[in-house]
Image: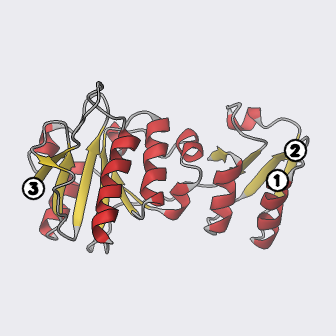
Amino acid sequence: MIFYGVNPVIEALRADFPLQRIYIDTRKNNPAVSKVEKLAKQNAVPVKRLSDLRSLTKSPDHQGVCAECEGLGTTALPDGPIDADLIVMFDGIEDPHNFGAALRVCEGLGVRHVIYHKGNSSGITPAAVKVSTGAVFHLNLYHSNLNTAMKKLKRERVSINVLDGSGDLSIYDWQPQSPACLVIGSEGKGVRFAILRQADQVLQIPMHGHVNSLNVSCALSATLAVVAAKAT
């Protein structure tokens, strides 16, 4: 896979993620590119200069830097429990920009474990990596059938908390029971009923403006910020 963007490549190098090669546009010579080259040298990752990266990246948003790797580090759920106070689960976030933005929120607000279903979501695409600004390289990403994942978490006594407009509990009144899983769906469809019915609690964000909903990353930001505030 080829992923692109200065920050994603830098974060991959910082995380010591296995890269096969880094490509840099021959016309790019700036502090950011110098930083990429320095980190690549420290990590013993070969660097090659090319005159055109668009043929590799298939995108105009490469910022003159891209990297090649075998995969982007998603794994199946572990056999044992996930050692975390809070796990986030994505149900059906199909847009890679929304998916990447939500991953960036998770990493920035301290969540390290994310579960998603490849069959009904964007997955870890180059665009999602770019929008995440490289957050994907600092997360534990698990792909699984969500019903299977839900049953596993319940067996391990993880509380299931779904964020949905139909919820009867405000996020401000939520007292997360550790370990907990927070499930969030897409803007259009929300969380599927098959997942919703397994929830221990259904949460909602009180809206006080003229619009009645937030996009995925904003809703996730608000909820995780409340969780973080209660933990301090």
Give the residue pinned by disc 3: 200
Which amino acid type is shown beneath numbered disc 3? Asp
Marks 1/2 in contact by CB < 8 Å: the verdict is yes
Give the residue pinned by disc 1: 33
* Alpha carbon separation for disc pair 1 and 2: 7 Å
Which amino acid type is shown beneath numbered disc 2? Lys
**Camera-side residue: 134 or 115?**
134
Q: Secondary structure at mark 3?
A: loop
- Is residue 90 visible to the viewer in this orientation of the structure? yes
Location of residue 154 with respect to 70 vertically, above or below: below
* Alpha carbon separation for disc pair 3 and 2: 52 Å
* Alpha carbon separation for disc pair 3 and 1: 48 Å
Report whether 134 appears left or right of 221: right
Give the residue pinned by disc 2: 28
Q: In which image quadrant can residue 163 be found? A: top left
The x and y percentages for residue 8 are: 64, 52
Location of residue 83 with respect to 206 vertically, above or below: below
Tell me what residue is drawn at x 64 percent, y 46 percent.
3
